Image: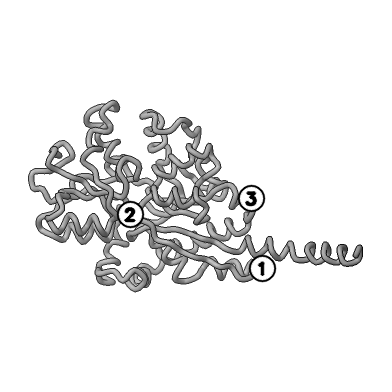
Amino acid sequence: MKFRAFAFVMILALLSPVLTFAAQTELRISKQYGINYLPLIVLEEQKLIEKKAAAAGLGEVKVSWATLGGGSAANDALLSGSVDIIALGVPPFIRLWDKTKGKVKGLAPFSDFAPTLTSNNPDVKSIKDLTEKDRIALPAVKVSLQALLLQIAAAKEYGLENHGKYDHLTVTLSHPDGLLALTSGSSGITAHFTQDPFLYTELKLPNIHAILSGSDVLGGAGTFQLVAASQDLIDKSPKLAQIFVESLGEAINWINANKADAAKLYVRATKSKESDKEILDMLNDPKGGFSLTPKKSTVFSDFLFKTKAIQTNPGSWKDLYFPYVHGLKGS
């Protein structure tokens, strides 16, 4: 009996590294709708994580993907443990960073493509023209990237105490649903805070025009989307997390060097109604771009802290990110 017990213990000891290794080589990632998530689509389509992990000696890595409608859904998915890495706008991420007391941090930013607020109401030339008759579609009321940009813009016009002036006009809709609602004219939606390719499609229509850009709100180019994870992933799988960031960098470099091919990949992978040429035009927009360098992160955190939406204000942008991007000249 003693021998059998000893043998059983030895078998468990031999198996435990294998079991641990298997747990560390599965990665569940969420993304969202829009051309700004192209680097993640490239990761998925070209299987860059799997290839890089195999080259690093991690063996076969299983990577699964989910597409979610907004930052709130992404936060819930991460907190529930149903995904390991989420892609979302900076403001909902900062709220999660604050809620978890820094146990969730950014792995890396990836998109500088700014959301834009459009309207089908000819009387609305700026947010000052919005009335009780208008309704604004965005991914999540009050907490999404678009919602916070609208709040910052309202605060600039009417003072910080009135930052929520337009909150009651907003309606939660995914970008595809927001596009349909705005263009159908039958839902009561008169404005849409969205991104390409939905923005591009809307602005081609003669009755839709832009009234506010996210870059205008921030006063220049900034980071609008990033990928985040919990400390648990870093503790259990630091090498895999590093491989993810490196793979994301490779995807961005490939897009920047092969925009025509990247446009074709996007159309094929998303079954986009836009042509390859139209997507390429969006990728060539000098106001957008993809980068691992954080930009203007503290504009959002400062505003959230001033409006008491978060309890802790990060002392530096580096407080929001794991060390993978600390060597970059961020802000």
Residue at 24% x, 34% y: name it: 154
Q: What's the mark number on residue 57? A: 1
Residue 132 position in % (x across, y down): 14, 38
Tell me the quarter of the image containing the C terminus. Answer: top left
Give 101 or 315, whichever is nearer the viewer.
101
Crowding at dot 1, Cα within 10 Å, few <14 / some 14-19 / many 20+, comes out as few
State the residue position of label 2: 288
Residue drawn at (44%, 71%) of the image: 45
**Mark 2 touching mark 3, by CB under 8 A?**
no
Question: Tags 2 and 1 in contact by the CB under 8 Å rule?
Answer: no
- Which one is closest to the eye, mark 2 or mark 3? 3
In the image, 9: left or right of 267? right
Look at 18% across and 48% down and name the residue there: 191
Residue ranking furthest to the front: 1
Report whether 93 appears left or right of 159: right
Q: Mark 2 or mark 3: which comes first in sequence?
A: 3
Viewer-side label of 3, 1 = 3
Q: What element carries label 1?
A: loop
* Res 62 quadrant in image: bottom right
Q: Nearer the viewer, mark 2 or mark 1?
A: 1
| 149 left or right, relative to 81 | left
Disc 3 from disc 1: Cα separation: 19 Å
Image spot of residue 52 (x, y percent)? 57, 67
Q: Is mark 3 on a helix, strand or loop?
A: helix
Q: Nearer the viewer, residue 248 or 26?
A: 26
Q: Which amino acid does label 2 sit on?
A: Gly
Q: Give the residue at mark 3.
A: 235
Q: Is mark 2 on a helix, strand or loop?
A: loop
**Disc 3: CA contacts within 10 A as few (<14), some (14-19) or many (>=20):** few
Residue 135, image quadrant:
top left
Residue type for callout 1:
Gly
